[in-house]
Image (cartoon, rainbow, N blue to C red):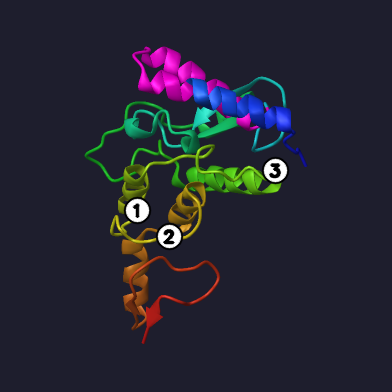
Amino acid sequence: MLRKTNSDIAAAENSLARLGRSLAGSHTAATRLRLWSEFIRLRDGCRCVDCHSTRRVSAHHICRKSFLPEAIFHTGNGITLCRDCHREVHGGFNGRPDLGQPMDAQGGEKIDTMERLFGALCEDARDRGILRDDFYFLSDSVLARFKMFQGFDPWTPFPGTRIEQAFLIWRQAPRGMVQALVRAMGFEMLAGPIPPGNGVGLSG
């Protein structure tokens, strides 16, 4: 298991501060993206969070820039991947999405992959003792969008840090699908997310 040293944390914090100053200033999008990428790689120990390779790593947007531009510089929307893992997650459709279609109708958003990568970030952050909202930031509005994509009211509460909430939101099956299955069995859905591994959230 890779552990952060004090110098590693300081380097990531300094990189995050540079990104913050850039976002608050008048820097170009290219400069901001370079600083975002630098922070993501430093935070993740300059190795692939998915397979732990240290060869040819780069920062990847979990939720694509073209699909959710609001999250382009959010630190919780980035993960370090090696070339092979990066190529795998970009497989299939990688063009500009048609936002008039349901999410992932073109196969570009890869909901299962987003869930897996958010989960990998959560596990990595916990293992390394750096589960911090500034290191893994997602705004309230981005989390609300995630909830709406999954069929939840945007104010539905999810527990945990921001990155843990993102994982739990994407871990849920789309709410419309769940409601149809539950009603077919003669039950009604209660409000809120269904905790994994139990039947809480159903009423007879």
Range of magenta residues: 19-45
Residue 148: x and y, percent?
30, 52
Compared to 198, does 117 lie above or below?
above
The front one of 153 and 82 is: 153
Q: Are marks 1 and 2 in contact (CB under 8 Å)?
A: yes
Disc ID at residue 158: 2
Q: Are marks 3 and 2 in contact (CB under 8 Å)?
A: no
Magenta segment, prevailing SS (helix, strand or loop): helix
Query: How would you rate the neighbour count of disc 1 (Cα within 10 Å): few for under 14, some for 14-19, many for 20 or more?
Result: many
Q: Where does the N terminus fall, quadrant-wise?
A: top right
Amino acid type, label 3? Arg
Compared to 61, does 114 lie above or below?
below
Q: Where does the C terminus fall, quadrant-wise?
A: bottom left
Say whether residue 84 is visible: no
**Label located before the other in sequence (1 or 2):** 1
In this view, the mark in front (3 or 1): 3
Seen in the image, is 120 located left or right of residue 173? right
Q: Secondary structure at mark 2?
A: loop
Please give the name of the residue rendered at 41% of the width and 75% of the height, measured from the top-left corner: 201
Seen in the image, is 135 located left or right of residue 21? right
Compared to 192, does 54 lie above or below?
above
